[in-house]
Amino acid sequence: MTQVSEAIARYHKLIESEPYIDLAWAKKLEEEMKAAKLAGRPISPVLRPHLLSHRDYTAMAKAAETVLSAIGRVTQMALANPALLARLQLLPAERMLAGVEPGYSFASITGRLDASLNNGSMRFVSHGADAPPGVMFGETLADLYYDAPPIREFRKKYKLKKLPGAKPLLNVLLKAYKDCGGKQKKPRIAIVEFRQPFQSADASEHALLAAFFQSEGFSTEIVPPDQIEYRNGVLRRGEFVIDIVYRRIKLQDFLVRFDLTHPLVRAYKERAVCMVNSFRAELSAKGAIFDLLTDDAVTAKFPAVERRAIKDFVPWTRLVQAAKTTYKRQTVDLPEFVMKHRAKLVLRPNDDNAELHTIYGLRTDDLGWEKALRQAMRTPYVVQEVAEPARSVFPLMQYGSLMMKDMQVDVHPHSFLGKVHGCSSWLSVAGSQGFSTLTGLAPTFLLEGK
């Protein structure tokens, strides 16, 4: 039994005994989450944090930083090579905006990897070129859980360490602004997002983030893109002048509603504002970036440490198309290979799109897989060798009673300028492909011994 599994077993035994079994502390924790504006329903469905050993976290951070370096390298190659760029399946507007220099040299200021940590193995299956969701929610959750009665009792025997939250994000925003030539000592920050229908102004993680930026002395507003104007070289919302745009809108979602004459696009192209992340960063969020990463012909001249990390931690990935490709140095017909090896493959949309779903071969039959493959041939998808998902049993409160549930755990290392500062742990019901109210965030702590 590992130290982490021993600690989890001890914690479960603790909350199944008096005085914690009546769950009064859990009900109070729910109220504290609501008071802290952690979404309408509790954003964390479980009653214990996700625990990582210091060794596992350090190994994950090191591997993630090496893979992130390789992603940055292959992104720069694609920008300089039309044939590689074509493999990323960009829309014409995406391609045009990718050619605009953002004012700083980093491909992505912020980002996150989706990691599966399973019994000592580690795989990074996708990359998001945006600020990690959960940065502020995770930090607030960690503070609440850390002082919950059973965690306080647990900490008498085990040392827990909180992970970095929003401070590294603010630091890199300021670094990017300085690199863009910004002169303001206290630049004004606009968090640009689409507000959902019926969403109140204080109901999102961005409201917590804005409050944090303001507490650090930076004037910050949450700004919908349709309220932005650009004139005389200044981007603004009413009287609020914008120096830094913290973009929380995916480019494709933006392009559905606006064209390239939008004030934000014009200010970005004219370097009148520092935008994080840049439109160029969208390249590294394409599923097909992992196609390039796992193509030996593309990465042949990469540093040895990056090639080793790709081999060890990035599953084989290919853009779905009617073509020949290589798998373990063997030439295969891709559609035929995908049909034949359903059980060990997964189909992922090239773009993070709510209307397109990830399809696991093991969770469907031959007919369903053939239908999914036909769709993937029409709409940009990648096929990827499946990474065994990590699972763990978590306690939760249902109908006022304590229950134990087998949950899938996806860990997202948070990257800032290519360095990992913290991570978030996202839970879903093991084996489920649909929506569940049990999907959510667990606070993450490092277990640093007794």
Image (tube, helix red, strand yellow):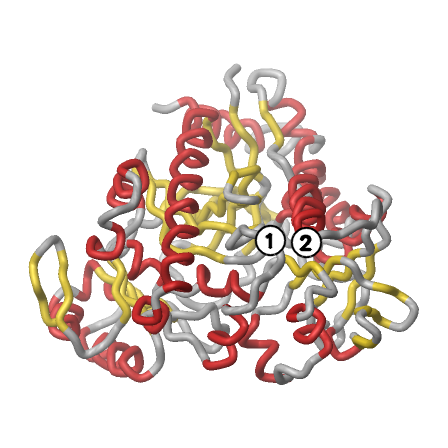
Quarter residue 278 falls in? bottom right
Q: Are marks 1 and 2 in contact (CB under 8 Å)?
A: yes
The earlier-in-sequence mark between 1 and 2 is: 1
Location of mark 1 (residue): 104
Q: Is residue 398 visible?
A: no
Q: Dot 1: within a 10 Å radius of its alpha carbon, few (fewer than 14), some, or many (20 or more) residues?
A: some
Residue at 56 percent of width and 54 percent of height: 440
* Amino acid found under the numbered disc labelled 2: Cys
Residue at 56 percent of width and 57 percent of height: 130
Residue 225 as seen in the image, left or right of residue 290: right
Q: Position of residue 231 (x, y in %)?
A: 82, 76
Label ID, residue 377 = none
Q: Dot 2: within a 10 Å radius of its alpha carbon, few (fewer than 14), some, or many (20 or more) residues?
A: some
- Distance from disc 1 to disc 2, alpha carbons, whole Å, reads 6 Å
Q: Is residue 253 visible?
A: yes
Q: Position of residue 57 (x, y in %)?
A: 46, 32
Q: Residue furthest right?
A: 239
Quarter residue 229 falls in? bottom right
Location of mark 2 (residue): 180
Q: How many tags in the picture?
A: 2
Residue at 64 percent of width and 22 percent of height: 153
The foreground one among 252 and 103 is 103
Mark 1 element type = loop
Residue at 85 percent of width and 64 percent of height: 241
* Amino acid found under the numbered disc labelled 1: Tyr
The foreground one among 169 and 179 is 179
Q: Position of residue 234 (x, y in %)?
A: 82, 69
Residue 118 as seen in the image, left or right of residue 128: left
The foreground one among 82 and 88 is 82
Q: Quadrant of the N terminus?
A: top left
Residue 81 as seen in the image, left or right of residue 21: left
Q: Position of residue 367 (x, y in %)?
A: 20, 79
